[in-house]
Image (cartoon, grey):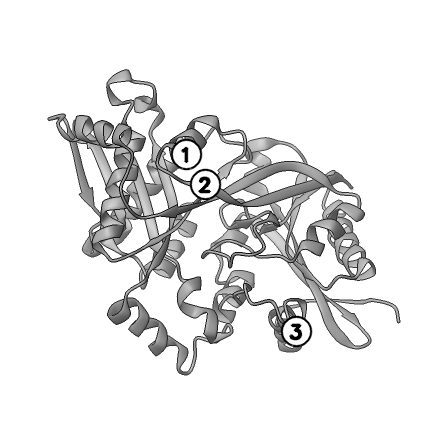
Amino acid sequence: MAIEIRELRKGDRSVLKDFLDVVDTVYEGEPNYVRPLDMDISDRLDKKKNPFFEHAEGTAWVAYKDGRPVGRITAQVDHEHLKRHRDETGSFGFFDTIDDIEAAQALLSEAAGWLRARGMKRMRGPYSLSINEEIGCLVEGFEFPPAMMMAYHRPHQGRLIEQAGLEKVKDFYAWRYEVGDVPARAQRAHAEILAMPEVHTRCGDPKNLLRDIRILMDVYNDAWSDNWGFVPMTEKELIKWARDVRLILMPELTKITFIDGEPAAVSLGLPDLNDLIKDLHGKLLPGGIFKLLWRLRVRGPKRGRLVVLGIRKKWRHVRRYAGLSAFLYVEMNRAAHLLGMTGGELGWTLEDNAAINAGIRLMGGRIYKRYRVYERAI
């Protein structure tokens, strides 16, 4: 039977439900898959609730075969990306499908046609929805569950993307890290930075969450501005993100380092939400919220994810402060240990970011997942 593609339109609860539920078919029997919270995905697709759509346009589709949902995809044009990179490139995301080349090609063709109609010359992805969210198709590390804000795919999904004519443009690494003793070299760097009178480090302040998130993102935007594909978050996106993570934010895992009173380096870790919600099957209500709160506040999270670590460019190549990154890694390791956490994920990092990758290796991290971004002319 031919593949039928239905677009998700405003107010269409039936297609939205299929968009959310199709992952149960795609990942049926896969013990490592963690279904994201339906509430989060719905809000991200809602053009009124998600400030991403103030500078972007997009839509979503569900693929049906024999009348049942078998796949999904989104397409989006981010005008902030276009303004910065001027590459006439749109993106696709939320690409989840059964092992069926007809379904995959139908979804990717629909996305490509939609992007082409808006003047795009290339299609890149998966980005769900932007480079600041889940990016890439998992191509190595299927034996591990996804950390929060990271995607999971079955091995066939990368193959289907390639069969549809897309080619690799960039790989991203996720690193596995276990909390414990840190190398002597990192300890020395930590001690040297700690002894500098002009350097001061503090944890995040829950009473001034938005202020500290603004500091974090200001340093992050400066530190990452030269990275491939980088697009800064807008003020409204930043506010939404701060509200979204308020429930799980742990001040001990938020570090802001000042040099002569100026924010110079930051790191942000979050408890791995996926480790806490796997058995909720995407449903936070009615009882899931209480399970989550108990696991966060009583049992305590055991795994985390280092989401941000950056040093302002002004200080990055000053020899005196060469140990700043190692200093932050040691600080985060100590905080995680005091919280009773055993380890987690660092990243993502670009495959060709030699400096940051070397620093993670120094701390004992090892690459355990690889995500791939593809593209093709449309």
**What's the amino acid at mark 1?**
Arg
Q: Nearer the viewer, mark 2 or mark 3?
A: 2
Instruction: Tell me which label, 2 or 3, sits earlier in the chain.
Output: 3
Instruction: Tell me which label, 2 or 1, sits earlier in the chain.
Output: 1
* Count of numbered circles in the view: 3
Instruction: Tell me which label, 3 or 1, sits earlier in the chain.
Output: 3
The residue closer to the viewer here, 255 or 179, is: 179
Quickly name the residue at label 1.
361
Q: Residues within 10 Å of mark 3 (few under 14, many from 20)?
A: many
Q: Residues within 10 Å of mark 2 (few under 14, many from 20)?
A: some
Q: Is residue 179 found left or right of 371 in the rendered image? A: left
Vertical order, 333 against 46 (above or below): above
Q: What residue is drawn where x is 28% and y is 37%?
A: 328
Q: Is residue 243 found left or right of 282 in the rendered image? A: left
Q: Is residue 89 found left or right of 349 in the rendered image? A: right
Q: Secondary structure at mark 3?
A: helix
Quickly name the residue at label 2.
366
Q: CA distance from mark 3 to mark 1?
A: 42 Å
Q: What residue is drawn where x is 52% and y is 65%?
A: 34
Q: Quadrant of the N terminus?
A: bottom right
Q: Secondary structure at mark 2?
A: strand
Q: What residue is drawn where x is 23% and y is 46%?
A: 334
Report which quarter residue 298 is drawn in: bottom left
Kindly give the residue lying farthest to the left in the view shown: 197
Residue 163 in view of the camera = yes
Question: Residue 47, position in %: x, y?
Answer: 55, 60
Q: Residues at badges 2 and 1 in contact (C-beta under 8 Å)? A: yes
Quickly name the residue at label 3.
18
Q: What residue is drawn where x is 47% and y is 55%?
A: 149
Kindly give the residue lying farthest to the right in the view shown: 1
